[in-house]
RNA sequence: GGGCGUUUGGCUCAGCGGGAGAGCACUGCCUUCACACGGCAGGGGUCACUGGUUCAAAUCCAGUAACGCCCACCA
């Protein structure tokens, strides 16, 4: 299974071999698989014209290949304080029929970000990869492929068909894995798993056999949702309901003996054809009008069967006529009524939903034909009372959209009663925690309402049920070995024809992929790294998959399968509705990677992750992310071009600017760590974006320009500091933007702690905490705001940046001291002729005044400006200040506020009021001066 | 039917008890030696509604409305 090593890694984002995905039960989905297909199909290039010409894959594939060559994706060695700790994620296995869709893109970006950070933090890290055989999906796909060649599945038989499935798997099964590679997902490609690999097959078999012998698996007759096209049972969870403009037919059933002058009763039905199998009529016990009918019988038309009228609580007296025809063999509710009332179960359909023998002319008809025929006969007999419109939803096959037939058949079940207690308990106790936390309750509710689980499927592709029957003596057993001879009577045994529900095997995914098999929990990986750290998935398979994994793991490993569960938001179309083919609101991630790069797509997707349960997809965020990546590239280029004569060495915060950016960096690391620990991905991207762009690029790099052209000693320090900050930022960005950060890191002359960034050390917040320096942060807030104020004045009055200006800054003693240290910087950034800094700085005549960061800035404009505009601006400023003052004044004269609010809040507001007061005075004086 | 989410500038969303924020879009200036996928400066919001708690509410509570999602059911 490890055919995916070095030679096969250069996957570009065009692996769309099998673009026509259908809806499926992929563990990795948002249920919006089908969106991919149409996105690829009609790939509407709306406003793609202004697309930037940049070959992302040329900047991505080489680094992916390098990681593969370095074996960077196998379990990492671990170092530092986490050296002995493991961090493992098992991927929700994508279906082998799958192509990458937005759900995968988001989910796998999340997992990759987590796993890459953990690897850099020094955990022994591994992301376990594999695919799901996807029973029905694959069988349908192969079936169709064979049919196109004129080959019938039934003609070639089971063995040959399974072979064809394996062939298909060999050819197309790795499509999605290649797309994961294009995304940069750092899964362990050297140990890829598959839910039908030999070890997995025996594990599934062991689970079945053990549960069978523990009486947790039993056989029973049940109403199942039968697909007459796929000729298989469809699990309740897999049924697709489709709205239909149906009709409600009101049929007259003659009473055997007239009751109170009535010859007949009227029942309402949406499925008149099933009347052939009716064995009763039911009314609500609460229904006083019809109470007298209970115990009477009707003579069923067409089949002349006498059936009783019974009373049952599930009947809604307000629906239809309050009288329900009961067809126990073809309706789940009716089955329940039949069980309670002891009614006969009359099966009228065969496995393809044609009427069985024994119904005269009706026999052999399809469902639709039977309906027409039945209605025609009722009409003839004058028994069709009337018809009403009745919009309702019909159960359809989630694969082929054929209407499902409730059908009585022999199936295998897992009894969940004993399994669910432990699965609920570990969540109650917090041994498994959900992010966001509200999903805990959803899980517990689901667990509480869990019903026995039908696990048999009438398919060929999958895990065959290891039950052996002896038709001669009735022997039956589950066995790890294939049995051919009956141990009781010596006759030939027969194995059950059915296979297991795909979820039966996927529930074992976390521990089987880590080596659990017949050997129990002693497998090295399992002993080392179980439970896994975190499972990330979409909300719609919470019950189908998440809950079942917990149940199975508790039973077989006596351990939770994962500590954390991330339920990520569902990716909706830009119209806020689920992406779907019919709506045409789907987006193809492969195209997104081509347009924005894998990094751009990843960052842009995570940017949109909030605590909310849906995510209205916004491609503009990807554009921003691509631009951000470009910004990073250019900042790195700037640093790179100013490194002539670079002497490696430790960073040195020799200036307040250095101390400021180091302090900001230290704060950033702490905030990114916290956001990561809480899986707040939107928060992480916002922090990184703002720091890198608005602080590092907009100010630190700008500040650096002068230093790089100046004093040699300072230039050297500046170079080192630039490299240091850039390197740290690259590390923080790497989990989300692995490619561009790796590319830049390779070129950076830093003292690296690993040859590749993927193996570098995550910045340690505690180590960086020494850089936290509020004083320098205060200094730089003043500098940046003063500079902006001067620029603003220039922009307002059309004064060229090349004209030097004189300014005076009035500030507190403390702030003046800080500002004095920044003279050079202020001169550089604001192009000043003179700069006065003093607590009692005098306002030059004819100057503009600005109040920023708690200081007063006077900008001398004598002879430069027409003061009309300035007057308007000042009046506006004066009014705004007055309003703010009034509000604060009210607050500060409020007894309640003064006595009850926290003292520091009161103090802060007092200071602010004072500031506003000064501003008001200053602005008023200035206005008076202008006249 | 049950559960959940959302409602903040034109759009997509942060903020979740003490001075309304970001990205995109928009306006003006700038092709200046990292970046026009850019720089600088700006305009724009009574935070859905109604009540309540509080000295203080976009933020907490209750209710209303709209939109939406999930689960169950549909004779």
Image (cartoon, rainbow, N blue to C red):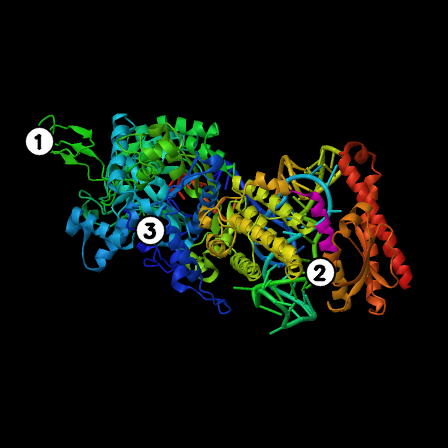
Which of the two residues, A689 or A477, is positioned nearer the viewer here?
A689
State whether the magenta stretch is mostly helix, strand or loop.
helix
Q: Residue at x 27, y 30 (%)?
A: A519
Q: Secondary structure at mark 1?
A: loop
Instruction: Quickly name the residue at label 1.
Output: A491
Label at residue A721:
none
Instruction: Quickly name the residue at label 2.
Output: A829
- A312 lies above or below A733: above
Q: Are marks 3 and 1 in contact (CB under 8 Å)?
A: no
Host chain of mark 1: A
> Does residue A581 show up?
no
Q: Position of residue A96 (x, y in %)?
A: 31, 50
> Does residue A95 show up?
yes
Q: Nearer the viewer, mark 2 or mark 1?
A: 2
Instruction: Quickly name the residue at label 3.
Output: A401
* Image quarter of residue A624: bottom right
User: Crowdedness of circle 3 by 10 Å Cα count: few (<14), some, many (20+)?
Assistant: some
Locate the C terminus of chain A by quadrant.
bottom right
Q: Are marks 2 and 1 in contact (CB under 8 Å)?
A: no
Magenta part of the protein: which range? A772-788
* Image quarter of residue A467: top left
Host chain of mark 3: A
């Amino acid at each position: 299974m490890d055919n995916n090593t070095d030679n096969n890694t250069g996957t570009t984002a065009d692996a769309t071999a099998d673009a026509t995905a259908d809806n499926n039960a992929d563990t990795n989905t948002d249920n919006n698989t089908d969106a991919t297909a149409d996105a690829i199909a009609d790939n509407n290039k709306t406003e793609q014209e202004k697309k930037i010409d940049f070959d992302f894959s040329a900047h991505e594939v080489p680094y992916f290949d390098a990681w593969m060559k370095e074996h960077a994706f196998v379990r990492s060695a671990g170092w530092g304080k986490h050296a002995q700790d493991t961090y493992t994620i098992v991927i929700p296995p994508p279906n082998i029929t799958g192509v990458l869709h937005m759900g995968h893109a988001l989910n796998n970006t999340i997992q990759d970000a987590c796993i890459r950070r953990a690897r850099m933090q020094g955990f022994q890290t591994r992301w376990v990869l594999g695919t799901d055989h996807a029973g029905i999906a694959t069988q349908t796909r192969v079936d169709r492929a064979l049919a196109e060649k004129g080959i019938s599945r039934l003609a070639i038989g089971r063995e040959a068909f399974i072979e064809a499935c394996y062939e298909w798997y060999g050819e197309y099964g790795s499509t999605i894995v290649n797309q994961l590679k294009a995304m940069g997902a750092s899964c362990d490609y050297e140990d890829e798993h598959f839910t039908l690999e030999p070890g997995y097959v025996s594990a599934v078999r062991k689970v079945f056999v053990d549960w069978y012998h523990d009486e947790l698996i039993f056989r029973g007759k049940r109403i199942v949702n039968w697909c007459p096209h796929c000729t298989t049972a469809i699990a309740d969870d897999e049924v697709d309901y489709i709205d239909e403009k149906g009709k409600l037919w009101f049929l007259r059933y003659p009473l055997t003996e007239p009751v109170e002058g009535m010859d007949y009763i009227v029942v309402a039905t949406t499925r008149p054809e099933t009347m052939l199998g009716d064995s009763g009529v039911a009314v609500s016990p609460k229904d006083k009008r019809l109470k007298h009918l209970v115990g009477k019988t009707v003579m069923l038309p067409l089949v002349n069967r006498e059936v009783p009228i019974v009373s049952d609580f599930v009947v809604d007296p307000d629906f239809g006529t309050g009288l329900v025809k009961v067809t126990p063999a073809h309706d789940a509710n009716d089955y329940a009524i039949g069980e309670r009332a002891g009614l006969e179960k009359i099966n009228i359909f065969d496995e393809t939903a044609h009427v069985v023998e024994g119904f005269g002319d009706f026999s052999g008809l399809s469902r639709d034909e039977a309906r027409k025929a039945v209605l025609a006969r009722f009409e003839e007999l004058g028994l069709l009372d009337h018809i009403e419109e009745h919009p309702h939803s019909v159960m359809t096959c989630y694969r082929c959209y054929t209407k499902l037939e409730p059908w009585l058949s022999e199936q295998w079940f897992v009894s969940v009663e004993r399994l669910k207690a432990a699965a609920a308990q570990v969540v109650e106790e917090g041994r498994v925690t959900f992010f966001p936390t509200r999903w805990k309750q959803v899980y517990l509710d689901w667990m509480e309402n869990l019903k026995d689980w039908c696990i048999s499927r009438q398919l060929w592709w999958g895990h065959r049920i290891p039950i052996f029957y002896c038709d001669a003596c009735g022997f039956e057993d589950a066995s790890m070995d294939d049995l051919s001879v009956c141990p009781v009577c010596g006759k030939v045994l027969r194995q059950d024809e059915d296979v297991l529900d795909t979820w039966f095997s996927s529930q074992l995914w976390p521990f089987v992929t880590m080596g659990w098999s017949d050997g129990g929990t002693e497998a090295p990986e399992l002993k080392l790294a179980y439970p896994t750290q975190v499972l990330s998935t979409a909300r719609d398979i919470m019950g189908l998959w998440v809950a079942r994994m917990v149940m199975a793991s508790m039973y077989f490993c006596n351990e939770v399968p994962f500590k954390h569960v991330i339920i990520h938001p569902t990716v909706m179309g830009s119209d806020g509705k689920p992406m779907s083919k019919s709506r045409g609101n789907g987006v193809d991630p492969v195209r997104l990677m081509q347009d924005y790069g894998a990094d751009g797509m990843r960052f842009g997707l995570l940017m949109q992750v909030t605590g909310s349960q849906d995510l209205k997809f916004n491609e503009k965020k990807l554009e921003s992310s691509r631009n951000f990546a470009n910004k990073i590239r250019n900042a790195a280029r700037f640093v790179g071009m100013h490194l002539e004569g670079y002497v490696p060495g430790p960073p040195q915060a020799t200036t307040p600017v250095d101390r400021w950016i180091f302090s900001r960096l230290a704060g950033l690391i702490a905030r990114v760590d916290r956001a990561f620990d809480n899986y707040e991905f939107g928060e992480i991207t916002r922090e990184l974006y703002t720091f890198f762009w608005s602080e590092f690029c907009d100010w630190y790099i700008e500040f650096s320009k002068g230093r790089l052209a100046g004093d040699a000693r300072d230039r050297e320090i500046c170079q080192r500091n630039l490299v240091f900050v850039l390197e740290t930022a690259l590390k923080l960005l790497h989990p989300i933007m692995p490619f561009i950060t790796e590319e830049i890191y390779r070129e950076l002359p830093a003292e690296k702690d690993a040859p590749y960034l993927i193996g570098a050390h995550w910045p340690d917040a505690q180590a960086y905490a020494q850089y936290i320096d509020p004083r320098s942060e205060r200094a730089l807030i003043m500098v940046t705001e003063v500079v902006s104020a001067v620029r603003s004045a220039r922009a307002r009055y059309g004064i060229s940046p090349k004209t030097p200006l004189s300014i005076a800054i009035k500030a507190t003693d403390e702030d003046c001291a800080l500002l004095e240290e920044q003279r050079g910087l202020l001169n550089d950034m604001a192009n000043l002729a003179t700069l006065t800094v003093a607590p009692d700085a005098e306002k030059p005549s004819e100057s503009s005044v600005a109040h920023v960061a708690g200081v007063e800035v006077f900008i001398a404009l004598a002879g430069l400006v027409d003061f009309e505009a300035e007057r308007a601006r000042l009046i506006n400023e004066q009014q705004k200040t007055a309003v703010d003052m009034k509000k604060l004044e009210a607050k500060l004269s409020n007894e309640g506020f003064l006595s009850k609010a926290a003292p520091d809040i009161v103090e802060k507001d007092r200071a602010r009021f004072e500031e506003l007061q000064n501003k008001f005075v200053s602005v008023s004086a200035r206005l008076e001066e202008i006249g």
